Image (spheres, rainbow, N blue to C red):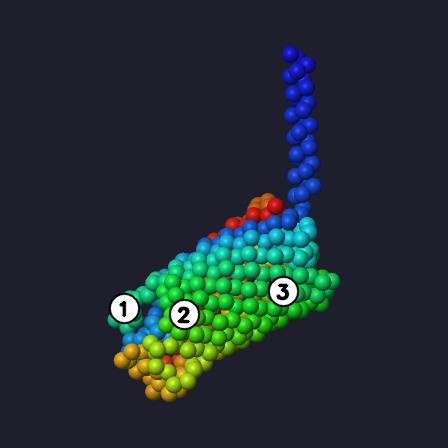
Amino acid sequence: MILFNFLNRSLLLQSIIGLSAIVSSQANAYLFEAHTNFNREDSKIHLRKSRDQTKALSFSPLYAFGKTKSWTTSAKFFFGDVEVTDTPWADANFFSRKNNIRLTYDIEDFTGEASDYVINDEQTTQAVDLQLELFLGGLILKAGVEHDKTDFNNNHGWMGSVSFGGYFNEYHQLYGSIGFGRDNADPSIDQKHFRIWNYYRGFIPIGTHHLKVHADIGVDFKKLNYGPAVDIKGEPDYMSLMLKAGITYFPIPQLGFGPELTAGFEGYNNSPPLFLGLIEVGENDSESFRKLSLAFNLQYFPIEQLAFSAGVRLTDREHNQSFEINTKSLNAGLTLRF
């Protein structure tokens, strides 16, 4: 009996030692990353003066105010071990450069704010995004396709994109992206979408600390055709120019936090005027927004396999004629690696 107990304890001890060896051998690398994030937005419109065209605000592609809840889940598989070192853990693959494929699912529920000036809207949008990222020496090649569906008007859309760039050195990368997409809805609503973006990512070592800097600039173009519900002579144009810049400070590899600023312009042009049923909107329906957004984000890894993230964002979109839309956004996320 004593011998039996001794053998059992020996086997248990050997199992624990073996399991510890396996875990320790894999603790500094991972092949799979899963991430989920919940975001809640609350947008309010503030009218500077009352005008007839504000009665049709909810029809414009530039207007969106109310409450939005969105849930994003993604899974990323790497074709090789991503090493976790003394560089920031959140961006481990920036330094490991392992080829990977990512699948993302997003669902968003929007409830418009009803008032004397707008028509209440409720809609749910679902999107699936597939992205492939390849590192060929110092070169970066990306390709992706996205499909989305909105139940409000039975809208179906897709967008494909390719990106190409490279690393200057170990700490800096720059790449550009071109995308083309199309949306179709019932009855015969059609939208063509073209975009060009450039992205910079860089790290500045400060002793044992790191400072991450990122800057993005891009232009989006759209051709809109609303179908028989909206009487338009010709196709209206949409254009946006956006600049995003931010810094993230890493006092230790496990923790990163910092602000992000987004500034830009959105423009919508249609001439002669358009008709929404019996409503005529403007003599020349040319509109624009100035957009300014400030965010603060934080992510912390208590262990190499688990991270918590949170963020807050304040956005102001000022219309060129009569109002502005203010948005408050809160998000929380969870990341698993193994």
Q: Quadrant of the N terminus?
A: top right
Q: CA distance from mark 2 to mark 1?
A: 27 Å
Marks 3 and 1: CB-CB under 8 Å? no
Please, what is the three-letter code of the amino acid marked with disc 2? Ala
Residue 210 location (% of width, % of height)? 65, 58
Badge nearest the viewer, 3 or 2: 2
Q: Nearer the viewer, residue 234 or 82?
A: 234
Q: Classify 10 Å Cα crowding around label 3: few (below 14), some (14-19), many (20 and above).
A: many
Please, what is the three-letter code of the amino acid marked with disc 3? Lys
* 216 to 304, vertically: above or below: below
* 181 sits to left or right of 249: left
Q: Residue visible at 68% across and 38% down?
A: 22
Quadrant position of residue 133: bottom right
* Numbered mark located on residue 142 in the image: 3
Quadrant position of residue 317: bottom left
Lower position in the chain sequence, tag 2 or tag 1: 1
Please, what is the three-letter code of the amino acid marked with disc 1? Ser
Q: Residue furthest left?
A: 116
Residue ID for mark 2: 185
Q: Secondary structure at mark 2?
A: strand
Q: CA distance from mark 3 to mark 1?
A: 44 Å
Residue 25 location (% of width, % of height)? 69, 41
Residue ID for mark 1: 115
Residue 73 location (% of width, % of height)? 50, 54
